[in-house]
Image (cartoon, helix red, strand yellow):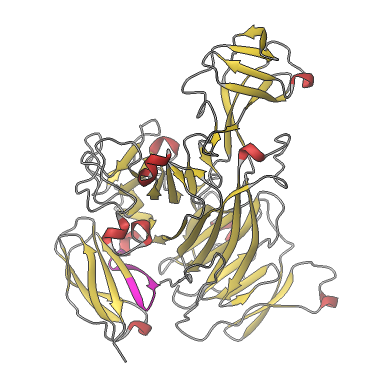
Amino acid sequence: MFFFRKTPGLRIAYLIWLCFAASSTLAQSLPEEDKADSLYMVIYKTNGDTFILNLNEIDSIGFSTSDSIPISPAEESMKVVVLNLNPTAATDLFYIRTHYNESKDVIVAYRQNENGVITQKSVSIGCKTLSDAQLMGTGGTTFTHRDSTAPFFCTKNYWHLFAQHGYVVPTMDNHIGMTDADVGTAWKDQLGRMYTIGDVSPSRVVLLPIISLNCNGHNERGWKWPISLPITQLMHESDGVVDSVFVPTGLKSIQLRPLMKAHERKFMADGQELTTAGVYSVKNFQVSEVQDGYDPATVSQWFPTPILEKAEVMAQFYCEYNFTGAQCSVHTSVDVLRSLDCVFYGATQQQTFFDTDGYKAMFMIPKAAPQQGVELDRPFHSPSASSPNYHFCRTEEYLRDVNDPIDRCISYLYNASTDNYLLGMAAGLSLVSGSTQKENRLADLPVGSDNTHYYIGIFSPENINKFYIAAFNTASYSEDDYYLPCGFHRDIDYYVSFFDPAANEGQVYWYKDGNRYVIYAHCQTQHDKLDITVPDIMNGCSLHIVEKTPSAELLSETIQKGHFSVKYADTAANFIVLTATPPLD
């Protein structure tokens, strides 16, 4: 289960924790004299027992090899290993080991990526008797990646800016003998697009755009990403006179990172801030940070690493990751501090599973029209890595019902020969655009006659089964050339949850929305009466349907003793979204 609420209007907010029982005792640091030989020596307590662990014993993949803390079911506690509170480069941050089923545990690991922000790294499952390092080794890892899973803007001119991929620029072979003396010189291509030479090596030349401000004060580039319209000729300009012309070869691209800085990062365990790396046994774990996204036009030095000290902040994000076992709810606040070129904003970007060993990756994306002859609202096998992307837009072509947009993806690994499931994952927005009201959900997703600026999400088998779900796009700002205005603010919530598909009955997620709760449940099996369990704090709340699939039926009017009932009439990808409102005093 998860619970979160951000106070409106505040850029920096903290999670309001509701614990289902008394909080676990947190790890306490040893006296200073006991730390002399071991920087990360800590004492922690669980079930009344005291242990000592030396976290300097880090194995080759950067994770602690300790297995001292016994793993309890998810409703009791989880093991949190914090590796680094203040990293200075891309590195591992923390991982969580928790109950998966009666015989297995699951480890979810996070890192700081090349843009300096928090991102998911890997998910592993394995026998409870395995050590952490063994479980995260080759035998237990179901996927691992270095790509960013943070929210991102997709812009018209910068390509993917900020948290996802940094800043993409073209490169070419250095076949004309350029030297460092050519850095900063001005060139234009056959289409009149302007560049300066950003960096030179014996084998490669990096091109940077020349950026100007138009009459509206917006950054203006003559190109989006000059690979789709390749550079076929470059001409050197000196005081408006072309004195050198050549044909580039080996045109490619690179990503210049970082374009973000994270600060005010906090690690909270059962409501208490952690000040030392260590191992903790807790019920709730939260990591939050403020992320600044910079304007590439104001970066004065790009090589060898972008210098951001004097660059201008275009947008600021507040992100908090709230863990309860293998479930993580993510809250993001977006503040646009200066008019920002933006086609759409992806609140959740994840790397789903890909085929491994005898297991086949399967996906279920409800509410989508068939894509290339494939029904996506029931489990379908992973296409080959060379398959094209599946796009989901709010158009008649892509949605079964344009008034019922996609809000999540469910995926899992399945071995047909043994009828065995390895691991499942559900991810998506807690209702598109972070609202339970359909009129609010659809405000920034207008119905379109084509696919331009109406994206809801993209599933990309060719990029190792990556998908994202867009929180909003800027079609409503089309008269201003799709620029989000200064002062634009949006709060968005999404979730990622790992589960055992073999026991996938009654999966439920919830969060607090003002004085009420929002409950989201899904199921792929048929039940005449399925008992759904929620925290006791919801007892007495009256239930109201926000939306559901046709085969889902609510059988309870109120929550009694932490339970309510739902009927699922068939084995389709069914779900039901409810609000639970406390009784009036």
Point out the image quarter for the N terminus.
bottom left
In the visual, does 440 lie left or right of 206?
Answer: left
In the visual, does 43 lie left or right of 441?
Answer: right
Q: Report x, y in % for residue 458.
A: 37, 42
Of all residues shown, which one is farthest toward the bottom? 585
Of all residues shown, which one is farthest toward the front? 215
Q: Report x, y in % for residue 345.
A: 44, 48
- Residue 445 highlighted magenta (yes or no): no
Q: Main secondary structure of the magenta part?
A: strand
Would you place residue 487 above or below residue 448 in this image?
A: below
In the visual, does 216 lie left or right of 364?
Answer: right
In the visual, does 386 lie left or right of 226?
Answer: left
- Residue 512 highlighted magenta (yes or no): yes
**Residue 560 in view (yes/no):** yes
Residue at the location (28% across, 68% down)?
Answer: 506
Residue placed most toward the observer, 525 or 113 = 113
Q: Report x, y in % for residue 13.
A: 54, 69
> In which quarter of the view is residue 557 placed?
bottom left
> In which quarter of the view is residue 501 placed?
bottom left
Residue at the location (53% across, 65% down)?
Answer: 97
Q: Report x, y in % for residue 426.
A: 37, 57
The span picked out in magenta is: 504-518
Would you place residue 381 above or below residue 28 in this image?
A: above
Residue placed most toward the observer, 327 or 203 = 203
Would you place residue 419 above or below residue 214 in this image?
A: below
Residue at the location (36% across, 43% down)?
Answer: 475
Residue placed most toward the observer, 408 or 353 = 408
